[in-house]
Image: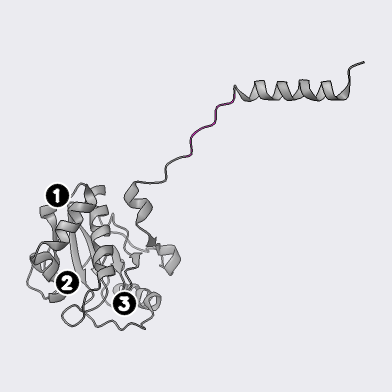
Amino acid sequence: MIRPIVIAAMILMLVISCAKDIQTSPEPVMGTPEEQTLKMVTRAEWGWVPLTDSIPEHEIKYVTIHHGGEDFPEDKDVIKYLIGLQSWSRSDKNWIDNPYHYMIDLKGNIYEARPIEFPGDTNTDYDVRGHALICVMGNYENQILSETQFEQLAKLTAYLADKYDVSQDLIKSHKDYTETLCPGKDLYRYLEDGSLLARVAELRK
C-alpha cells in the first residue's frame, strides 16, 4: 500500500516538472522613460468635453511655447479655468477646442488639452499648423516663472521634441513667429539666454 506521504511527494514532483515547461511573458514596458516620469492630468480627469467638430490633421514639426496672457492667482480653480476656456473657445471663437495642446499651471501640473493631431489656434497671425503648442497659465509680463514650472516646461518640451523628432532650433516661442508679447518677458528670458534649451538638451540625452 502506497502511503499518502509518498503520493503527495509524487504529485509535487509532477507539478514541478510541468512548471519547467511553462514560460512566462515579460511584463510590458509602459511607454518611454520620458512618458513614465512625465505625469499629466488627462482630458478625462479634468472634465474635457469631447470634440463635436473637426479640422484637417497635421504633422508636428515644431514645439512652441505660449503663456495664457492673463494674471493667474495662486488660489484660482484650475479645473474651472480649463472648462471655461474650452467653452469660450468653442462658443465665442468658433474653434474646435481649447487653443493649446498642453497647459501647465502655477504648481507645474501638466494638463492635456486639444488633441495634438489637430492644429491649435491663436489670436495672432502665425500659421500654427505643425506646431505642438504648450501654454503656461498666467501672464509672464507680470508674473514670475517658478523653478518647478521651468523644470516641467523643460520636461514636456523634451518629451514632445523626442516623440516628434523636433530639432532644438525649432523649439521656440509665440513671439518668435509674430509680433506679440507672448510668452511674457519673464518666461521668454529663458529662451533668450538659452537656459531652457540647454535643460531640454540635457533631458533628451
Q: Position of residue 172 (x, y in %)?
A: 13, 61
Q: Secondary structure at mark 3?
A: helix
Q: Nearer the viewer, residue 197 or 132?
A: 197
**Left or right of 42, for residue 201:** left
Q: Is residue 62 magenta?
A: no
Foreground mark, 1 or 3, reads: 1
Counting the numbered discs, the total is 3
In-front residue for pair 142/129? 142
User: Does residue 8 appear anywhere in the picture?
Assistant: yes
For the point 36% across and 54% down, the residue is: 37
**Residue with the mark numbered 3:** 88
Would you place residue 92 above or below residue 178 in this image?
A: below
Q: Which element carries disc 1, helix, strand or loop?
A: loop
Q: Which residues are magenta?
A: 22-27
| Dominant secondary structure (helix, strand or loop) of the stretch shown in magenta | loop
Q: Give the vertical position of 198 relative to 33 (above or below).
A: below
The Cα–Cα distance between marks 1 and 3, rounded to whole angstroms, is 33 Å
Judging by the rendered image, the residue that carries numbered circle 2 is 187
